[in-house]
Amino acid sequence: MEVGPARAAAAERALLAAAAAGRTGLVIVLLQGGAAGGGDGDGDGDGDDIGDGGGTALRLAAANGRTMTALALLRHGVSGPALETAVRAAAAAGKKETSLALLRAARDEEALQLVSPQAAGG
């Protein structure tokens, strides 16, 4: 079923609001319904298709200390630059537990890049 632009925009807003509020169950339902939580806009459903001027659902969840919601988004496939932004946003907001949980849940090579970009790059 094709989703119209108005419905996609509403799903985007709902996902971002749910992520910021830590409504993990709602985030999961929205993701299963086709909403995605990042910002490259390629429409491939990999979890990085929705942006709001650089803010992502993962970043919003992390910056607000919504650890379980951030981990749900991470499990959905949000990674790469969105993960780095989220870890840094959580740390900057003083949400140590959230930033550490994201680092622990990241793939080994991603976690290494986040901790030491020089070590991962050679």
Image (cartoon, helix red, strand yellow):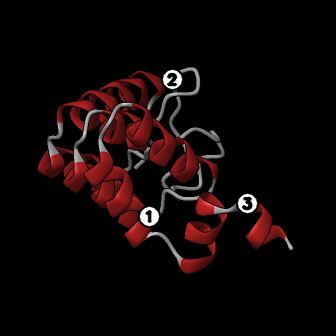
**What label sits on residue 117 in the rendered view?**
3
Q: Amino acid at mark 3?
A: Pro
Q: Nearer the viewer, mark 1 or mark 2?
A: 1
Measuring from the top left, give residue 14's x and y in whole percent.
Answer: 27, 29
Quadrant of residue 39 within the rendered picture: top right
Which quarter shows the C terminus? Answer: bottom right
Measuring from the top left, give residue 49's x and y in whole percent.
Answer: 55, 43
Q: Nearer the viewer, mark 3 or mark 2?
A: 3
Q: Amino acid at mark 2?
A: Asp
Q: Secondary structure at mark 2?
A: loop
Residue occupying the point 38% across, 44% down: 35
Against 87, residue 17 (above or below) is: above
Quadrant of residue 109 within the rendered picture: bottom right
Measuring from the top left, give residue 52's x and y in whole percent.
Answer: 51, 23
Q: In the rendered structure, which disc, 1 or 3, sits on the residue that comes first in sequence?
A: 1
Query: Which residue is nearer to you in this view: 65 or 28?
Result: 65
Q: For the residues marked 3 and 2, what is the alpha-carbon distance in whole angstroms?
A: 26 Å
Q: Residues within 10 Å of mark 3 (few under 14, many from 20)?
A: few
Residue occupying the point 20% across, 55% down: 68
Q: For the residues marked 1 and 2, what is the alpha-carbon distance in whole angstroms?
A: 24 Å
- What residue is shown with label 1? 103
**What label sits on residue 52 in the rendered view?**
2
Q: In the rendered structure, which disc, 1 or 2, sits on the residue that comes first in sequence?
A: 2
Q: Secondary structure at mark 3?
A: helix
Q: Amino acid at mark 1?
A: Leu
